[in-house]
């Protein structure tokens, strides 16, 4: 294995280029993940790195950061540029204070601070020590060290970490809060090149909106992997598309890439169709007149024309979109769901306090809360999985709910394969029918014999969606349904839910799903009360701003 990082002065070779990837290949055994990749990432742009699950998005970021060695090729970073990479190991800094972890985002500054502190603890100073300390103070000032703690604190507060936790040890914070601290670390100190892998994970609505504005106003180079379509649309100036081990660059955001790539495929198909018609015409002429002496010259001429026609090779994308379609077996009656004065206390605190609402025909309700546990608890109570303290829940007699939980662990504590797992819920004798259905959910060939307890998060999510579709419910309860899904599956799920004729109760961090599906928003406040608005998600956000 070999990995080369070389440096050049800005402007000497490429002007404003921050990172250049030259002929990079990466192989794991017989599998080639990338081959001869050549791409330039320039200053002032934000690149969304997209590709199917397993295409190597996170791996490519690690190549750019130097964490993974390449098989061939080199990554060239402009001289003196600082690369900042969003770390994923939130246990790495357990014994460090939160504020220190953020400042460690600028490694040079943090090391200067450590050395300064150590020197000031000395009881005796030599002339050499004095000179060294003077140099450290000068570097400290150049790196804006006097404002480091204030800058770190501002980042933490903007991401939703209360001031009282800024000097706590990392191990004292919940895992979701630690993830935010690592994001603050990546953003700290105005890095020249910012590499972010799923930065919106664990962020609430306000934090995501703040991050969007931060990146829009960020003047340096950003490369992002994200499954959030709205986030990519909001912040990206370019899309870097990984397909078949190559990376192709598009100017514009995610929607522009999607429409452009679809249009390009259509143009190539139309061009090929015309060429195929011309080929058939020439072949027909040759077949009819090649044996006719008077027409032989024309036939020979057309044969030469035929040989020159080449069909443009349309390589189908490695992306695969599952077919998600929720069919209703028994339509719901007029009565859907009535909740009155629902109260639930957890650890001495009321998380639901006299909550009342009625679900009507056609409702697609987005539930919003700062605390994920509150939304999950409400859904579990509605479905009889958890008990409540007071109040009443009345389902319509015709309602057949389908539930997608946020935590599906218990469903997969078995060594059954996918066919057997689906079969235990439904009495489908025809294996061909079941295989066809699973094939549409991207479980083809021998995939159906995979043990469900070793499936990836995305595969388990598709299994759960398959289960719900086969239930044919007339009402859906979905707790973070886009979790673990790739962009293709999220797109298919979004379309399936828009087309669903029943009612939907859901919670999601996916802006696009919320905005295209919800016609009503119920916000659960910290005091356990609710605000019920019959508005779209975008209208709800506008009201929040006001």
Image (tube, grey):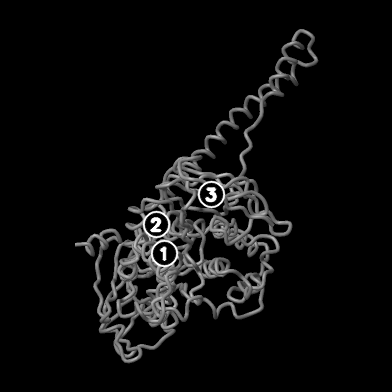
Please determine whether, in this image, residue 27 is positioned above or below residue 22: below
Question: In this figure, which residue is indicated by the disc labeled 1?
Answer: 200
Judged left or right of residue 452, residue 365 is left
Locate residue 537, reporting x and y percent.
Answer: 30, 61
User: Considering the image in quadrants, where does the N terminus appear?
Assistant: bottom right
Of residues 186 and 515, the one drawn nearer to the viewer in this rendering: 186
- Please tell me the numbered disc located at residue 288: none
**Front position among marks 2 and 3:** 3
Question: In this figure, which residue is indicated by the disc labeled 3?
Answer: 7
Locate residue 253, reporting x and y percent.
Answer: 42, 48
Tell me the SS state at disc 3: strand
Question: In this figure, which residue is indicated by the disc labeled 2?
Answer: 231
Of residues 25 and 92, the one drawn nearer to the viewer in this rendering: 92
Locate residue 450, reporting x and y percent.
Answer: 67, 69
Tell me the SS state at disc 2: helix
Mark 2–mark 3 Cα distance, whole angstroms, equals 32 Å
């Amino acid at each position: 294995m070999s990995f080369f990082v070389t440096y050049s002065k800005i402007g000497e070779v490429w002007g404003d280029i921050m990172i250049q990837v030259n002929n990079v290949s990466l192989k794991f055994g017989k599998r080639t993940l990338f081959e001869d990749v050549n791409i330039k990432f320039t200053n002032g742009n934000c690149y969304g790195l997209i590709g199917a699950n397993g295409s190597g998005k996170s791996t490519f970021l690690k190549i750019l950061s130097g964490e993974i060695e390449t098989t061939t090729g080199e990554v060239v970073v402009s001289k003196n540029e600082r690369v900042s990479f969003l770390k994923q190991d939130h246990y790495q800094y357990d014994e460090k204070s939160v504020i220190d972890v953020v400042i460690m985002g600028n490694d040079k500054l943090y090391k200067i601070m450590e050395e300064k502190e150590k020197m000031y603890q000395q009881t005796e100073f030599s002339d050499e020590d004095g000179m060294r300390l003077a140099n450290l103070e000068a570097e400290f000032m150049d790196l804006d060290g006097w404002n480091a703690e204030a800058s770190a604190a501002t980042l933490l507060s903007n991401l939703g970490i209360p001031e009282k936790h800024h000097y706590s040890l990392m191990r004292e914070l919940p895992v979701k809060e630690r993830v935010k601290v690592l994001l603050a670390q990546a953003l700290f100190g105005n890095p020249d090149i910012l590499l972010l892998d799923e930065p919106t994970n664990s962020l609430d609505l306000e934090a995501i909106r703040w991050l969007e504005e931060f990146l829009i106003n960020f003047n340096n180079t950003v490369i992002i992997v994200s499954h959030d379509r709205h986030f990519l649309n909001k912040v990206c100036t370019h899309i870097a598309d990984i397909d078949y081990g190559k990376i192709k660059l598009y100017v514009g955001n995610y929607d522009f890439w999607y429409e452009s790539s679809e249009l390009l495929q259509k143009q190539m198909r139309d061009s090929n169709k015309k060429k195929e018609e011309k080929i058939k015409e020439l072949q027909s002429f040759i077949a009819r007149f090649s044996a006719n002496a008077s027409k032989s010259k024309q036939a020979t001429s057309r044969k030469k024309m035929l040989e020159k026609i080449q069909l443009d090779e349309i390589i189908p994308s490695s992306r695969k979109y599952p077919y998600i379609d929720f069919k209703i077996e028994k339509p719901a009656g007029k009565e859907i769901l009535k909740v009155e004065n629902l109260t639930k206390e957890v650890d001495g605190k009321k998380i639901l306090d006299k909550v009342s609402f009625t679900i009507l025909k056609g409702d697609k309700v987005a539930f919003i809360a700062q605390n994920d546990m509150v939304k999950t608890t409400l859904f579990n109570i509605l479905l009889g999985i958890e008990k409540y303290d007071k109040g009443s829940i009345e389902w319509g007699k015709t309602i057949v709910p389908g539930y997608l939980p946020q935590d599906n662990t218990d469903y997969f504590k078995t060594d059954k394969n996918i066919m057997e797992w689906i079969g235990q819920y439904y009495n489908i004798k025809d294996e061909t029918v079941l295989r066809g259905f699973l094939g549409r959910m991207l479980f083809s060939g021998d995939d159906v014999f995979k043990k469900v307890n070793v499936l990836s998060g995305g595969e388990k999510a598709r299994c759960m969606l398959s289960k719900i579709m086969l239930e044919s419910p007339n009402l859906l309860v979905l707790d973070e349904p886009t979790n673990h899904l790739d962009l293709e599956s999220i797109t298919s799920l979004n379309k399936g839910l828009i087309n669903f004729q029943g009612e939907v109760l859901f919670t999601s961090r996916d802006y696009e799903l919320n905005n295209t599906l919800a016609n009503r928003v119920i916000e659960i406040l910290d005091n356990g009360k609710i605000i019920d608005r019959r508005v779209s998600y975008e209208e709800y956000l506008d009201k929040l701003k006001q």
